[in-house]
């Protein structure tokens, strides 16, 4: 049976009202974790209740445990 470990990382969105993601910084983070053996499983955003703009981007990774 395969066993997995998981990692969740958050990247804050910038801009006056939010919603702007620094894609160069996000790519660097994804590449760094990929080099450590982490496999991207899912990415989603969280929204501000009032304006609906992106507050942060959440990425979930997994890799074989052990």
Image (cartoon, grey):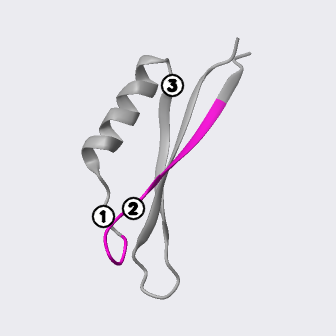
Return the residue at label 3.
38
Query: To which quarter of the image does residue 21 belong?
Result: bottom left
Where residue 17 appears, as percent x and y from the top left, is 35, 78
The answer to whether 25 is drawn above or below residue 48 in the figure is: above
Return the residue at label 1.
20
Q: Mark 2 against mark 3, which lies toward the viewer?
A: 2
Real-space CA distance between mark 2 and mark 3, rounded to the nearest whole angstrom: 23 Å
Real-space CA distance between mark 1 and mark 3, rounded to the nearest whole angstrom: 25 Å
Marks 3 and 1: in contact by CB < 8 Å? no
Where residue 60 appears, as percent x and y from the top left, is 54, 42
Question: For numbered disc 2, what is the local secondary structure?
Answer: loop
Kindly give the residue lying farthest to the left in the view shown: 24
Q: Which residues are magenta?
A: 6-18
Residue situated in front as seen by the camera: 4 or 34: 34
Kindly give the residue lying farthest to the top in the view shown: 66
Query: To which quarter of the image does residue 5 belong?
Result: top right
Return the residue at label 2.
13
């Amino acid at each position: 049976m395969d066993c997995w470990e998981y990692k969740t990382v958050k990247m804050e969105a910038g801009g006056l009202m939010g919603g702007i993601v620094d894609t160069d910084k996000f790519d660097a983070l994804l590449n760094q974790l990929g080099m450590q053996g982490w496999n991207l499983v899912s990415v989603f955003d969280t929204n501000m209740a009032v304006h609906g703009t992106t507050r942060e981007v959440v990425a979930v990774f997994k890799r074989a445990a052990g």
